[in-house]
Each structure stands twice: as structure tokens, then as C-alpha cells.
Image (cartoon, helix red, strand yellow):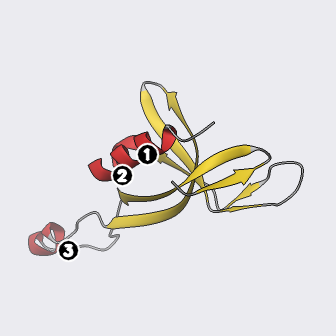
Amino acid sequence: MEYAEVSGVRYPKVKITWRDIIGAGSFGDPEESRELVCPVMVTEGYLFDTFEEDGEKYIRTFASYQMSDEASFGDRNCFPFSVLTSESQRDVEIALLYMD
């Protein structure tokens, strides 16, 4: 598995797909309302960690980092695990096995 090493810690590279919320602020008829669906989004980067809060699991990712003695991360995201596709949930679980 490909990874980035930052300050001696390995972070596995991941490509996750997830469902995003979409909204429409204008009025629409029933047919237009039925056409409103959640898009599938793709995020590529490195798995920072996972955590639980109030019984819900989350993952954090980053896409850029600073090369220095002290770790510093950019392009950071936090996702509820539940919005990930089942394939991405599995991939994240596998990536966690490669973390130090």
C-alpha cells in the first residue's frame, strides 16, 4: 500500500467515494423534486485517523503536508463513516491496518 511518511508516522493513501448532500433553493414541481439525488463524490489523499463521537464513527484525511521536523497538514477533511460507499468503508478498514 502506498503511504506518506510524515515525522516518522506512515499515513496510507486512500481514494474514497462518498455521498454528498445537495440542495435546491428554488421552487420545483414534483418531477423536478424527484430528479434531486445525492451525487457520488471522490476524495483522494491520506488517511489521518478515525474517531468516534456520540456513537458515530468518523475519518479524517489530508492531501498535503509540510516537509519539516514538525508535522503540519493541509487540505484536510472530516467525513462521517456512514456517508462512505461500502467499498470505501472496506478500503478504509484495510488502510487502518497499515498505520503505525
Q: Is 30 placed above or below 74 here?
A: below
Residue situated furthest front in the rendering = 1
Q: Amino acid at mark 1?
A: Val
* Residue 79 can be seen in this image: yes
Which residue, given by chain and number where applicable, does mark 2 sit on? 88
Q: Amino acid at mark 2?
A: Ser
Mark 1 vs mark 3: in front: 1
Residue found at x 49% / y 37%: 97
Which residue, given by chain and number where applicable, does mark 1 sit on? 92
Quadrant hosting residue 20: bottom left
**Tag 1: Cα neighbours inside 10 Å, few (<14), some, or many (≥20)?**
many
Q: Tell me the element at label 1.
A: helix
Left or right of residue 89, residue 67 in this image: right
Residue situated furthest right in the rendering = 69
Left or right of residue 51, residue 36 in this image: left
Residue situated furthest left in the rendering = 31
Q: Are marks 2 and 1 in contact (CB under 8 Å)?
A: yes
* Residue 85 can be seen in this image: no
Instruction: Measuring from the top left, give residue 53's x and y in whole percent.
Output: 51, 28
Residue 4 shows which numbered tag? none
Q: Amino acid at mark 3?
A: Gly
Q: Is 29 placed above or below 12 here?
A: below
Q: Tell me the element at label 3.
A: loop
Which residue, given by chain and number where applicable, does mark 3 sit on? 28
Q: Is 57 placed above or below 60 here?
A: above
Quarter occupied by the C terminus? top right
Q: CA distance from mark 2 to mark 1?
A: 6 Å
